[in-house]
Image (spheres, rainbow, N blue to C red):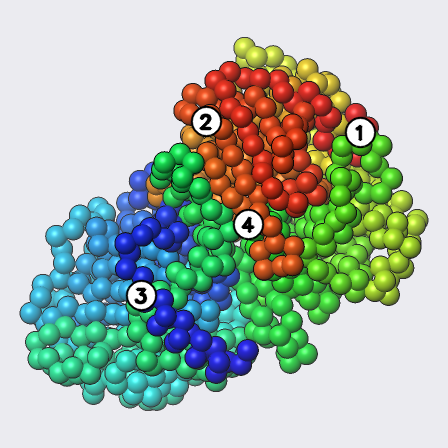
Amino acid sequence: MSRKSMGRKLATAAAGLIWWTGAEARLTDFVDPLIGTVGPTPGSTIAGGNSFPGAALPWGMVKAGIDTSYLGLPEGLGNDCNAGYSPIGNVTAVSLTHVSGTGGVPTYGLISQMPLLGSLEGINLADNTTYWQNRSLDLESASVGHFSTTLLNGIKIDITSSNHTALIRYTFPPASSSPNTTTTIPTGSAPTTPSTLANTAHILIDLTHVLPAWDADAQSYSQKFLSGALSLRSQSYSGTATYTGGWSQPDTHTLHFCGNFSSAASTAAEAGTISWPYSPTVPPPDAPVVRPYADVRASAGSGMGVGAVFSWEYGGADGGGNASAGAGVVVEARVGVSYASPERACRYVEEELPAGVRFEEVVERAKGEWEERVLGSVVVDEEEEGRANETLKRMLYSALYQTGLMPTDKTGENPWWGAEAGEEPYFDDHYTLWDTYRTTLPLYHLLHTPTYTRILHGLLNIFRHEGYLPAGRTANWNGRVQGGTHADTVFADAFAKSVIGGPPPGTSNNNSTTTTTSSLPLNELALSPTDWADAYAALVSDASVPPARNADPVAFDGATKEGRGALDEWRALGFLTRNHTRSLSRGVEYAQNDFAVWSVGAGLLDNNNTTDGGVVVDADDVATWRRRADWWVGQWNPDAEAELEGVGTFRGFVGARDADGRWNLTDYDPRSCGKCGWGSDIYEAKVWETSFAAAPHDMAKVVELMGGDEGFLRRLDASFLPGFGTSVGANNDAGSALFNPGNEPSFATPFLYNYVPGNHWKTVNQSRAIVDTFYSDARNGYPGNIDSGALPSWLIFNLIGFYPIAGQPLYLLGTPRFSSLTLKLFGGTPHATRLQIQAVNMTVTSFYPQRVTLNGVALDRAWLSHAEIAKGGKLVFEMGAEPAKWDVGDRPWSLSSW
């Protein structure tokens, strides 16, 4: 589709959607983008979801919202504002680029505007602490496609967006109005209020604006402005800005932009361009002078910041062209961004937000896109119970919404690949695959299949052009690698489900014939033989080619950009030592990654020894990956002990080693993860948690090492007891048990009871309790950062009744929370079908499955294969008030035999 036709489609579609009257509830009505914006401490984002509540389309490049700062507010609340938003922070700007749900040092908050009111006397335009404003929380709202807030000086900000553009409406108060100071504001906040009645509206363009790091020790890799150029006209501006720093630590990150205002700025002495000596942490003592120049530039190395001010005097034409002396001023800004050029950014504005399209039409289009592309993939059948649980519906559809914000579709916008990339799929902001490979991307496979296929192509294109698959990626730059190379597992998951349809060849004898070989695969992802050739080559590269060792300020061994930085020891020793950071978590994750390489290689080897795409699969290599899939056992200390008072002693955990093979017990505690960060033994998970997550591909061996069925169940039970947990960092703590509901390595733990027949009822107990205790439709409705949709996707699987084991065509049964819902599987592909999930006789006291049937056939096992789910049909849970041991059949597949 041409860009011109895109613009016409927007105008037509938006106009066609305006008929909606609100008489009937829409799916978007059940979405609250503010869920996950607050932590357990009122007003603070600490341990909160860091959800992005601004305006965005599904996987859209522009995510427009307010940026805030905790500076100047009471101690104990301050934190990074990773999504720009904070519940009580001072507003510093409206910017176009954000991520959602992430931790670590902030990324983006780029290409900004800030509305100002009245005289600029006494304001330092290079120091946002002199002009920031808090806002009236009573007048703040967020819905699909629309964010609105009102600053305490009376300026109302409304934001909506399209794929590459944002439409921002500023409503400045009448000159005769007093600033809004009636709303309660945080203690310590000191909003600027003009000393005289305002008669001028301003919009500040500050190219140096970024989301900064909060912690002092993170300033070295916090975002920084490098250079920029800005060209002004009376009603518009365009230019370029280059930055460095942020999560992926890119060398440079350049964005081009173009902004149009709804009316020309009036002549005012305070309008024009500005420049000043730039420091990322210390503002200049002297305010920059506004000069009547139309162009300004700061070259790299100049140490200068640049910006501009547009001003509208009251009594002139308002944003709609209406003269109204004494009235307020409405100014609309249509702003686009591009990684290609300012000219393309301007084209995006023309095509996506043509002048004739009203704000409300853009909002309506956003709602339509979210319903069509994301929310409509799950249908709650309210007729089955008269009315559905409204709270759970809000949780479900808000979670679906939050899984569709990232990664970011930047197809055609990669600046490094140039014209050769063309319209090849490209997604950025995998932040990170360590977070999303377990639940988010498996959910995409089922519900957003065409997008998932494009994401897989995008990952392959990164490998094809740059030489490595990303483990994390932002700002068009690979980084950072928290543990293993989990794109390997992403491709193994896709391969096992859509190509093989069952376990790797030659392993099905580990279980009975009811394993995942029940039907031929659908190939619903439609990746070509050439794609799988490149995918296998990428996986082999991860497993065999050491990456360049970039220096990292928080990991002494570096190599956090891409690949496996500890591959030297892994290949030489078969385990990792404390000569590498995060040796425990990386030691088990590398084995999981090697299992992924082996499973793809074995499948291709079984297919005539070639990928049909030009890559011959070497049998010796495949045998190597198979051996290395067992090496997680080399990281397992069978004598490590943890004693839980009143419960007992547990033996056998992952452990730290020295190069001579001895176990290193210095500062080692199975109930802890030390400092739990980049320089620690283990990354963001206790040793106890990581031991359960050590080998999802070989749970038979995990059960054996934990003492067999009895010892395994006893340890699982102990995981959920309150009071035995230790802190994994203020932003990652949730609950007091050893199990952490907000931590990805713990995601599967409540479902692990299913590996011991007759214990599915315990999975039901724990999974329901976790949802009811730690998840809600409130603003603090998640137990930690939502991590690019990881926690919302975990919640979705718990609400629908099964859980995926990534890298395998396997789903462990949970229990549905709705009496009836329907999943629209593989929509947009030739294999589209539907799976209805029913919970018969379910009440608040009757929620234990007594009998489970799939398409009328009773199951005697607490798991399903992907092939079974892919057929669609009806999955029925017949509920009762007491636990029932209906699941006495086969265990799920495991690499080792049961």
The residue under the point 58% across, 56% down is 827
The secondary element bearing badge 4 is classed as strand
Q: Is residue 120 left or right of residue 753?
A: left
Residue 383 placement (x, y as % from top left): 40, 39
Q: Amino acid at mark 1?
A: Ser
Q: Is residue 671 left or right of residue 592?
A: left
The residue positioned 9% from the left and 63% from the top of the image is: 178
Q: Amino acid at mark 3?
A: Trp
**Quarter placement of the N terminus:** bottom right
| Residue 495 visible in image | no
Q: Name the residue tied to disc 2.
A: 842
Spatial CA distance of label 2 from label 1 is: 32 Å
Q: Are marks 3 and 4 in contact (CB under 8 Å)?
A: no
> Which tag, 2 or 4, sits closer to the chain's start?
4
Which is more N-terminal, label 4 or label 3?
A: 3
User: Label 3: how many residues lie within 10 Å, few (<14), some (14-19) or many (20+)?
Assistant: few
The residue under label 1 is 512
For label 2, count other residues whose C-alpha is less than 10 Å away and answer few (under 14), some (14-19) or many (20+). many
